[in-house]
Amino acid sequence: MEIEVKGHSGCQVDIVRENNDLYIYKSSYDKKYLDRLVKQVEKQQEAWRKEYQHVRIPKIFNVVQDDDHVSIKMEYVYSRNFIEYFESAGFEQVDYFVKALILFIEKELVASPLQLVHTSITLDKFEDVKKKIVENPLLSNDKEIEKLIIESQKRFTSFGEQRTIRIPLGLCHGDLTFSNILFNGNNYYLIDFLDSFIESPLLDIVKIRQDSAHLWSQLMYVKPYDKLRLKIICEKIDYEIDSYFRKYEWYREYYDIYQLMNLLRILQYAKEDNVINYLKCEIGKMLSNRQGEVIEKTIVSNAEPSNKFSLIVPAAADTDDDSLPYVFNLNEKGIMLCVDAIMGLNTDIFDDIYYTILRKHVEKFSIDEMLNLQFRRFSLKNVHIIVLDNPTISQTETLYQTIKQAGIEGGIFIKDADGYYEAEIKCENSVAIFQLEQMEIVDPQHKSYVSVDDMYYITNMIEKKIIGHNFNAGGSCFVDSELFCNYYEKLRAKSKKVYVSHIIYQMLLNRYQFRPIEVYNYADWGTQGLYKYHLRNK
């Protein structure tokens, strides 16, 4: 059996079954590339002979070389790519990956003593790159690129005022990007080693941050994925990598100039408009020192400590035909669905209860008066109706506007209006969970899913991707409403659509602890169809 897959740099890559085992065959007939390919193979073989903690190198079994052709037979690794891996990775797996990268580069540093390197090597490379950019017909007449080259020239001229620099020389992978890492559990296989104009671990940090800071490999991925979640993970990795290596003077002094060189080297071969525009943006950021803000645990609440605990029920959903959302329908007992949604909770523990609705529903249906009748009927105290003038694009925006408009302080429990459950709630960071196997009918694509460890802490939360049998039953608790708002503001600056699961996942990465809340007698009214099913089967 033979499967051909897409290769890079003029190589053909085939997956071949031999005696029930799979192998990778990588080959090239490009005479200009053959010598370089052999050097890369030798580099991979040398790395395979070394032992790295959590990092593996696929074994090369055979190399066939003649004047016109090179063919390499190597180990096939069952694995996932970085998007697939990070799509379901909990905070512990992200931490583990970062530690593996740091240990790998540290081992390179042990074999790479600090040495004096003439800056002329880097300046010559810049001149070569600049020449190729000018020769690229897609780039040569671009005024923005002309300005970037002029500004880059100033940086490299300033860099060249030093005749030599002191950096570690010896070992490096050469192209240590996320796309060249195969994820196999907690083992990470490095592939596609590359020779570099300077063999330094500094260049490996540059390539890793090409993805963690500049998100390069994501640009090459065409399948749908959660872009905000991946950005959250990349920024976390970038923060940890940058923070760790800042202890080295050579990193602090020379990282920026070599990352600039790296992005320019990618630009010289760019052929697609989206790639060119992306690189122009990232190079512009490097030159203006505008790096993306990383969300770390430095996000704190400046509010005075508050013992208040509030329940928020966002019921500001809009409809395409301007009809009244079904959560305001009455059930067989004459209870509005959005009011019945909180009847399984002990509402006495909350200082205040907030229902958020849209002004259009007030003006057209007097929904505020109908809600007040329900509150009086059930003797619900300290209930406030927050009216939003315009529909929001997400539940988190509704919650944010509610907190700001009402001046809510202290802890908040967020209860979805489209479901019922019973649970004991207390003011701690937590998520209400229920098990899929206990559901007769479920709408899985509209759920967020939760992983819980043996110590009963939440380790992962992800939107619309099943990672286990626990899903969010429509309830989340935050001990600090201002902290919730601060995280929302930072994430909203990166994406229009922010889910509560994004906020919780970001907080998990930043070492905030969340507990699961097991709920009972769960009823899901997440859609009109589910509610009708619920009525038929009561």
Image (spheres, helix red, strand yellow):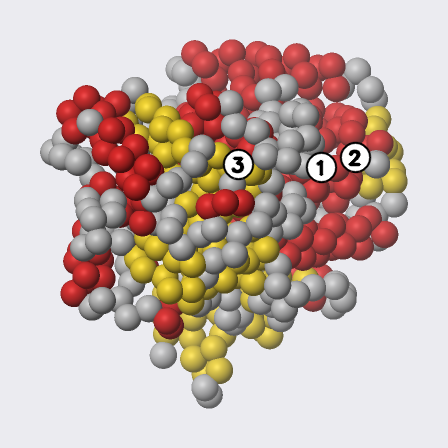
Nearer to me, 314 or 503: 314
Quadrant of the snapshot with the N terminus: bottom left
Hey, which quadrant is residue 471 in on the image? bottom left
Residue for badge 1: 242
Image location of residue 56, percent across then percent down: 66, 65
Task: Tell me what residue is drawn at x 20 percent, y 27 percent.
Answer: 366
Task: Tell me what residue is drawn at x 30 percent, y 20 percent.
Answer: 389
Instruction: Label 1: state its secondary structure.
Output: helix
Among the two numbered marks 3 and 1 on one chain, the one whose residue lies closer to the N terminus:
1
Q: Residues within 10 Å of mark 1 (few under 14, many from 20)?
A: some
Q: How many marks?
A: 3
Between the C-alphas of marks 1 and 2, the distance is: 6 Å
Task: Tell me what residue is drawn at x 76 percent, y 66 percent.
Answer: 51
Q: Is residue 19 left or right of residue 37?
A: left
For marks 3 and 2, give the one nearer the viewer.
3
* Mark 3 residue type: Asp
Between the C-alphas of marks 3 and 1, the distance is: 44 Å
Residue for badge 3: 351
Among the two numbered marks 3 and 2 on one chain, the one whose residue lies closer to the N terminus:
2
* Mark 2 residue type: Arg
Residue for badge 2: 246
Q: Are marks 3 and 2 in contact (CB under 8 Å)?
A: no
The numbered dot on residue 515 is none
Any part of residue 243 in sight: yes
Quadrant of the snapshot with the C terminus: bottom left
* Mark 1 residue type: Asp
Extreme residue toward the bottom, this view? 19
In the image, residue 323 sits, relative to residue 304, either above or below, namely: below
Q: Are marks 1 and 2 in contact (CB under 8 Å)?
A: yes
